[in-house]
Image (tube, helix red, strand yellow):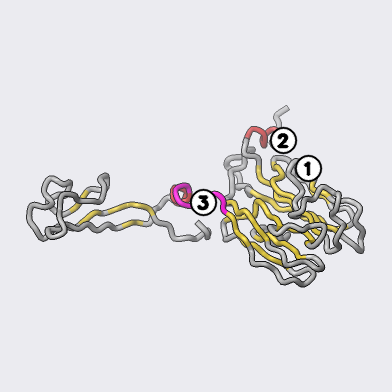
Amino acid sequence: CLTENARLKQWYQRRVRGSPWLGYLTNKGVNTKGVISNDRSCGVSACSERNWCEVTAVCKIPDDYEQYKAAVCPISFEMVGDRSSTADDAQSRASCPTGYKVSYCEVQTGLVHTRSDGAFVDPNNGNVCVAVNGGGGPGAIARAVCTRSEKVSDPCNSEGPHLPKFINLHSRGAAPSVSCPPGYEQVLCNARSPWLGYLTNKGVNTKGVIPSGNVCAVSRCSTGNWCEVTAVCRISEDSEVYKAAVCPTSD
């Protein structure tokens, strides 16, 4: 589940074994070669502590990777980083494993505007959520939600190359702003500034998040005292919405 090359397992069972006491396997689904067929439960009843029976099973790695993921791999889960030091600009990082991307990121300890500089998704690694301690802060803790991030079929061309489920955007400066491309929707926007107060009254909550539905932007910073925003965009879950926004028409 957690790596693209993970070894996979599936319940494909070969049920075998017996009992030292003849007759204890009779009429219990065990054939004359000591095998319980794969369409039956691997179990034998009506034995006793003294006249025991036993079963063994062999589990086979499946050929169908998607079947295993659907049955076993979580769609999403939380990761929480270690508390940072109390130094100004100290970072806490919550990292998602391979095959997953950050779909939510926050300063779990809050205090943005007073004792935290905010949060961001690493622009060079969409698997990492970063929370930043501010001057005089008690240490920040990053909290991320990690979501499975497989490639998806292009709704405009099912035979073409697959598309990323998530894309990451980043902007830094006096008035940073990002927006998701057509066919994608914003699921997360974070803001950060090393200068306390520069995110105050600008739509950024105390955990360094600009709520979804709002523009992912911060104004009234400066080149010297910059702010930054990062966004996570998810491909539309409705293929018809994606087609209407992106696919060329024949008109």
User: Mark 3 or mark 2: which comes first in sequence?
Assistant: 3
The residue that label 1 is drawn on is 214
Task: Give percent across and percent down for residue 61.
Answer: 38, 57
80 relative to 186 in the view: left or right = left
User: Mark 1 or mark 3: which comes first in sequence?
Assistant: 3
Residue found at the very far top of the displayed protein: 251
Disc 1 and disc 2: Cα gap in Å? 20 Å
Highlighted magenta segment, given as a residue range = 70-77
Find numbered disc 2 in the image and state the secondary structure of the residue it sits on: helix
| Residue pictured at 62% horizontal, 35% vertical | 238
| Residue pictured at 91% horizontal, 53% vertical | 220
Q: Nearer the viewer, mark 1 or mark 2?
A: 1
Task: Give percent across and percent down for residue 239.
Answer: 62, 36
The residue that label 2 is drawn on is 245
Disc 1 and disc 3: Cα gap in Å? 29 Å
The residue that label 3 is drawn on is 74
The reply to whether callout 1 and callout 3 are in contact (CB within 8 Å) is no
Task: Give percent across and percent down for residue 155.
Answer: 62, 38
Q: Amino acid at mark 3?
A: Pro
Q: Sort mark 2 into few (<14), some (14-19) or many (20+) by Cα contacts within 10 Å.
A: some
| Residue pictured at 43% horizontal, 57% vertical | 8
180 relative to 156 in the view: left or right = right
